[in-house]
Image (spheres, helix red, strand yellow):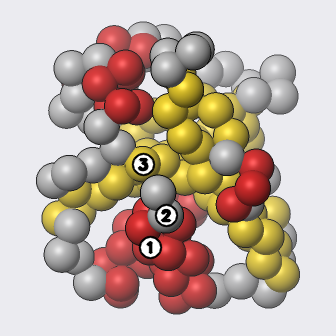
Amino acid sequence: MKACNIYRTKKEYKIVTMYHTDWGWYISDDPIFFLPLNATKEDIASAISKAIDASSDIEQPSSNSSKELLVKMKERSWSSLYKNSKCCDLYIDKHNATIKPQKYSSKYRALEPDKDNVVSMEKYNYDIIVDELLRLFELE
């Protein structure tokens, strides 16, 4: 399954490629795409498509640390990113796409799934995915 994270901060969108490991979990790494909040739907779809195309199954995660990923994402800390952004994970498997919104949990000081707003699509296209992402980012 291919995947990426999409963050919406106060300044921009950050689209981060995710890789599925042979251990069954996902890691985030390059390429990372930065788009202004006024980016067109086509630009957002293109960046998501590139991240999904780069996503793959891997045996060995890179040796990049969590701190190095933060630097690449132009963030000070995970806590700051989580508190000051909205996040959705996008998973694509053959003809299906699933968008899983994440929300900040002050209890855990981390992101947790927003199970009430998960969107599943059969025979998706990137225009529909972007429309759903933008809708989810507007939810409070």
As rendered, which of 72 and 57 lies closer to the eye?
A: 72
Q: Disc 1 to disc 2, how far (Cα)?
A: 9 Å
Could you say where residue 91 lies in the image, as x and y percent from the top left? 70, 57
- For discs 2 and 3, the disc positioned in front in the rendered view: 2
Could you say where residue 92 lies in the image, as x and y percent from the top left? 73, 63
Query: Label 3 belongs to which residue?
Result: 86
Q: Name the kind of residue labelled 1 in the image.
A: Leu
Residue count near mark 1 (Cα–Cα under 10 Å), binned few <14, some 14–19, many ≥20: few
Residue count near mark 2 (Cα–Cα under 10 Å), binned few <14, some 14–19, many ≥20: few
Q: Is residue 124 above or below residue 90?
A: below
- Residue at the spot x=54%, y=40% of the render? 103
Residue 54 visible to an observer of this rendering? no
Could you say where residue 29 lies in the image, as x and y percent from the top left? 46, 34
- Residue at the spot x=23%, y=28% of the render? 75
Q: Name the kind of residue labelled 3 in the image.
A: Lys
Q: Name the kind of residue labelled 2 in the image.
A: Leu
Q: Disc 3 to disc 1, how far (Cα)?
A: 11 Å
Based on the displayed image, in which of its 4 quarters is residue 37 positioned? bottom left
Query: Label 1 belongs to which residue?
Result: 134
Q: Secondary structure at mark 1?
A: helix
Could you say where residue 135 lies in the image, as x and y percent from the top left? 50, 75
Query: Label 2 belongs to which residue?
Result: 139
Q: Is residue 95 above or below residue 100?
A: below
Q: Are marks 2 and 3 in contact (CB under 8 Å)?
A: no
- Residue at the spot x=50%, y=82% of the render? 131
